[in-house]
Amino acid sequence: MAEASSDASLADDVRRHDYDRYLCALFAPAHRRPALVALLALNLELGRIRERVGEPMLGRVRLTWWRETVDGVFEGPPRRHPVARALAEAVARHPISREVLEGMIDAREQEFAGREFPSFEALDRFASGTSGALQRACLAVLGVDDAPEAAAAADHVGTALALIDLVRGVPHHARAGRTCLPRDALAEAALGTDDLIHPEGRARLAPVVEAIVDGASRHVRWARDLRRDVPPESLPALLPAVLVDAYARDLRRSGYDPFALGGESGRLRRQLRLVRARLRKRY
């Protein structure tokens, strides 16, 4: 009963804080969902480090802790942590790559590298190394092995979702006095972090946001170019592409102003979009 309660608590945490990926995981076969939730929970924990730790050295210490946790997951015994235990169970049941999980942790180092993302290329690499790697790990849980096209498509979809999420998170980050936007693009628009919370600064933000949204949409197109060679079992890992489309449309309609977006409204529409895509077996 304690293990069942822990699993439910982990799933509830993912549902509350990463609703989009949680929704997509629900389209996987029931016996594969706990492992997907474990991977999403790891990603959530890694993403929280930057939110909770301001000092770079402390952030790196936390990343080291997670590297050691992954060591225990694969070599045993796992740490007495709900995510570690869930990951150990997932690894025991599915061929999840240790290198991919370690890569997810390594990619987070960029968040503690001082200037974070000096360029769009750096931001794109970060999105691929974190969210792209996560979607590739999900393929192993879904039973998709030795399918390079599926891996490439999953990487593109994960990268696209991360880019869109970073843009949607601009208001939250700005209020916290930081930004995840490329520094070179901000400099070209004569924007500092403090400018983002003022209307006159927001007016200059649109070209920066537009470039990132266009980048996310390109990744989705590249993923769809591979559709003919992607096994149908991959679909739950690729469904976030449908949500990227929807968020990109919202941002374009807002004039590329993330401050003009609604909060968590539209959950039912997201669910319906995913159901429709699942029925059509498209992403």
Image (cartoon, helix red, strand yellow):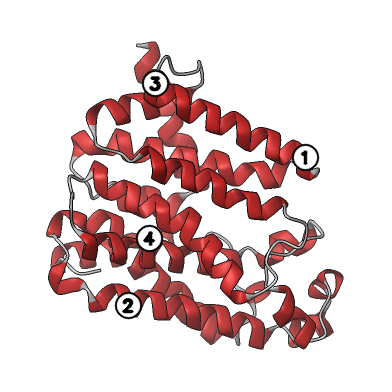
Q: Secondary structure at mark 2?
A: helix
Q: Residue at x 41, y 61 (%)?
A: 158
Rendered-image quadrant of the N terminus: top left
Lower sequence index among marks 2 and 3: 3
Lower sequence index among marks 1 and 4: 1
Q: Are marks 1 and 4 in contact (CB under 8 Å)?
A: no
Task: Using the image, tell me which numbered label, if any, was put on residue 171.
Answer: none
Rendered-image quadrant of the C terminus: bottom left
Q: Are marks 1 and 2 in contact (CB under 8 Å)?
A: no
Residue underneath mark 1:
57
Q: Residue at x 73, y 55 (%)?
A: 113
In the rendered structure, the answer to whether residue 6 lies left or right of residue 185 reads: left
In the rendered structure, the answer to whether residue 130 lies left or right of residue 64 reads: left
Q: Nearer the viewer, residue 232 or 92?
A: 92
Q: Amino acid at mark 2?
A: Trp
In the rendered structure, the answer to whether residue 9 lies left or right of residue 92 reads: right
Q: Amino acid at mark 4?
A: Leu
Q: Nearer the viewer, residue 27 or 35?
A: 35
Q: Amino acid at mark 3?
A: Glu
Q: Residue 154: percent from the left, percent from the top?
A: 32, 61
Q: Secondary structure at mark 3?
A: helix
Q: Nearer the viewer, residue 190 or 16?
A: 190
Residue underneath mark 2:
222
Task: Using the image, tell me which numbered label, if any, was put on residue 268.
Answer: 4
Residue underneath mark 3:
75
Q: Quadrant of residue 32?
A: top left
Q: Amino acid at mark 1?
A: Met
Residue 162 appears in the rendering:
yes
Question: Tag 2: Cα neighbours inside 10 Å, few (<14), some, or many (≥20)?
Answer: some
Q: Residue 273: percent from the left, percent from the top?
A: 30, 67
Q: Quadrant of residue 77?
A: top left
Q: Residue at x 36, y 75 (%)?
A: 220
